[in-house]
Image (cartoon, rainbow, N blue to C red):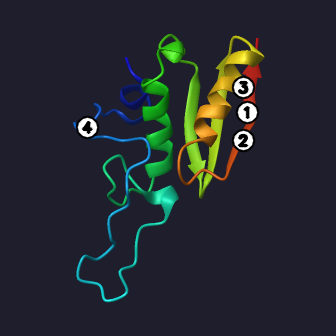
Amino acid sequence: MGWLQRLFGMEKPEDAQVNPEPTLVAENSSEGESIPLERVGLNGEYDQSGLAKRVALAFDEDSRFDDINTIYVAQLGSTVVLKGKVPDQDILSQLVEIAGGVSGATDVVTDEVAVG
């Protein structure tokens, strides 16, 4: 079971992207206001949990993490929050690096991750 399925109960959408271009909030808006990066969904649409879903997609796309099912991804604004347990510090560092590389992520918090 992939990360998106396990964490959000959804299959990967056909054109899902880790770093999609945000769509305009209102296509007819004279201001052309765009979606904040942390709220951009898998296809560029507005999604309250967009950043967390795109981090889960990034983990899905990296086969090194296929066997890890003890970490959970959440977000607080533009901060990615990882919770759970990982086998070693190296894996946690890799997860943090990938999560931090997703557009809209300003920080990755691992206070609630147990190592070992």
Q: Is residue 47 above or below residue 85?
A: below
Cα separation between marks 3 and 2: 11 Å
Give the quadrant of residue 2: top left
User: To which residue does mark 1 refer?
Assistant: 112
Q: Secondary structure at mark 2?
A: strand
User: To which residue does mark 4 refer?
Assistant: 13
Cα separation between marks 4 and 3: 27 Å
Give the quadrant of residue 31: bottom left
Query: In the shown orientation, is residue 115 left or right of residue 102?
Result: right
Q: Earlier in the sequence, mark 2 or mark 4?
A: 4
Q: Quadrant of the C terminus?
A: top right
Q: Position of residue 33 (x, y in %)?
A: 40, 78
Q: Earlier in the sequence, mark 1 or mark 3?
A: 3
Give me the residue at 35% from left, 46% from top: 42
Cα separation between marks 4 and 1: 29 Å
Marks 1 & 2, CB-CB < 8 Å contact? yes
Marks 2 & 4, CB-CB < 8 Å contact? no
Q: Is residue 2 above or below residue 35?
A: above
Q: Which mark is residue 109?
A: 2
